[in-house]
C-alpha cells in the first residue's frame, strides 16, 4: 500500500499533527512522528499506524525548540529514506497573558517552537527536496496568522511570522516542483485549546463556559469548532499532485472567522 512518499509531521503525538499523520498513513505514506508524550503511548500509536496501513512509521523525539536536534532529525530521516517528500510544520504551544505579565521565557519558547523551528526544518530539508525536484511543505499556522486576539502576543507574532516565511520560501522554490503553503485553522478542539481556557477566563475575568461560547465560538460564524479531520483532509489535498499550482498561499479553515 506504501506510496514510497515520506512525510515528517512535527508535533504529531497529539491533536492536529496526529490527525494529519493518521490521514497520510491511510493514503500509504511512510510517516515520521515527532512530539512529546508518554513513551509507551507513543510506541502504541506508532505500531498501530504501521500495522493498520502497511507503511513504515518511525518516531523521532527531537525538541523543536533546539536547532541542533532539528537538523539531526532531518539528517537521520534522510539517511534512512533519502529525502523528506512532505514536511508538515505543526508543533506548537500557547500561552495566554497580558503583555506586561507575559513571562519572557514563554515568549522565547513560543517564538522558538511556533516560528523558528519551521525555518530550521525547511533550511535542513530543502536541499534534498530540490535534488528530487518534488516537495510539499505545509505550515500549520492559524487564523492568528491573519488577525489578532488580545493576550496572545507571542502566538500571534509567531503565526504572522509563519505567513511571511511561507510566502518567502514559496517564491524561492516555485519553479522547482516544490510547494510551500500555510493552513490557518480557527479553533479546533485539541489539548492546546482546552489548556488555554482557564488562563483566558482569568485574563478576561469571565467563566470557562463563557470563554468557550463568548470568546472562542464567538469568533467563528459557524458556531462550531473546526475538526481535526477537516484540517487533515485539507493538508492531504495540499500534499497531492492536484495542488501543484497552490504555493505561497495562506489558507483559512476557520468557519468564517477571518471573513469578518
Ligand atoms: P496539541 O497540544 O494537541 O499538539 C501539539 C503538539 O506539539 C504535541 O504533539 C506536542 O508534543 C508537540 N510539541 C510541543 N512542543 C514541542 C517541542 N518543543 N518539540 C516537539 N514537539 C513539541 O495542539 P494542536 O492544537 O494540535 O496544535 C497543533 C498546531 O496547530 C499548533 O501549531 C497550533 O498553533 C496550531 N493551531 C491549533 C489550533 C487549535 O484550535 N487547536 C488552531 C489554529 C492553529
Image (cartoon, grey):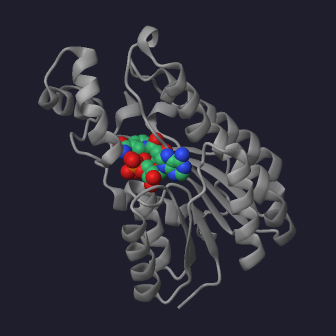
Residue at the far front in the pictured view = 39
Is 69 in front, or is 27? 69
Q: Give above or below for 188 relative to 97.
A: below
The answer to which image quadrant residue 197 occupies is top left
Q: Give above or below for 21 relative to 63.
A: below
Q: In this orientation, does residue 99 appear?
A: yes
The answer to which image quadrant residue 192 occupies is top left
Q: In this orientation, does residue 252 appear?
A: no
Q: Give above or below for 160 relative to 190.
A: above
Residue at the image point whose x is 61% and y is 45% from the top = 249
Number of callouts? 0
The answer to which image quadrant residue 219 occupies is top left
Residue at the image point whose x is 47% and y is 19% from the top = 103
Task: Classify the position of the C terminus by image quarter.
Answer: top left
For this view, does 209 lie left or right of residue 259?
A: left
Q: Position of residue 134 (x, y in %)?
A: 76, 68
For this view, does 52 lie left or right of residue 88?
A: left
Residue at the image point whose x is 73% and y is 49% from the top = 68
Q: Position of residue 208 (x, y in %)?
A: 16, 29
Q: Position of residue 14 (x, y in %)?
A: 39, 57
Residue at the image point whose x is 60% and y is 84% from the top = 3
Is 53 in front, or is 185? 53
Q: Position of residue 119 (x, y in %)?
A: 71, 43
Amino acid at each position: 500500500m506504501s506510496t514510497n512518499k515520506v512525510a515528517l509531521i512535527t508535533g504529531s503525538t497529539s491533536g492536529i499533527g496526529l490527525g494529519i499523520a493518521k490521514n497520510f498513513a491511510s493514503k500509504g505514506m511512510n510517516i515520521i512522528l515527532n512530539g512529546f508524550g508518554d513513551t509507551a503511548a507513543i510506541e502504541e500509536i506508532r505500531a498501530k499506524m504501521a500495522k493498520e496501513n502497511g507503511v513504515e512509521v518511525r518516531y523521532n523525539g527531537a525538541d523543536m525548540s533546539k536547532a541542533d536536534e532539528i537538523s539531526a532529525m532531518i539528517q537521520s530521516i534522510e539517511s534512512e529514506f533519502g529525502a523528506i517528500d512532505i514536511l508538515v510544520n505543526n508543533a506548537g504551544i500557547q500561552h495566554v497573558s497580558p503583555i506586561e505579565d507575559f513571562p519572557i521565557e514563554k515568549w522565547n519558547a513560543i517564538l522558538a517552537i511556533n516560528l523558528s523551528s519551521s525555518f530550521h526544518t525547511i533550511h535542513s530539508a530543502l536541499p534534498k527536496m530540490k535534488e528530487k525536484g518534488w516537495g510539499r511543505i505545509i505550515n500549520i499556522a492559524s487564523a492568528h496568522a491573519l488577525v489578532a486576539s488580545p493576550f496572545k502576543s507571542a502566538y500571534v507574532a509567531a503565526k504572522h511570522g509563519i505567513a511571511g516565511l511561507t510566502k518567502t520560501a514559496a517564491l524561492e522554490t516555485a519553479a522547482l516542483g516544490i510547494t510551500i503553503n500555510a493552513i490557518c485553522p480557527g479553533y479546533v478542539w485539541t489539548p492546546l485549546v482546552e489548556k488555554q481556557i482557564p488562563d483566558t477566563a482569568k485574563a478576561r475575568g469571565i467563566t470557562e463556559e463563557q470563554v468557550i461560547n463568548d470568546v472562542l465560538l464567538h469568533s467563528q460564524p459557524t458556531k462550531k469548532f473546526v475538526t481535526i479531520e477537516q484540517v487533515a483532509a485539507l493538508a492531504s489535498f495540499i500534499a497531492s499532485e492536484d495542488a501543484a499550482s497552490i504555493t505561497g498561499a495562506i489558507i483559512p479553515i476557520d468557519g468564517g472567522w477571518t471573513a469578518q
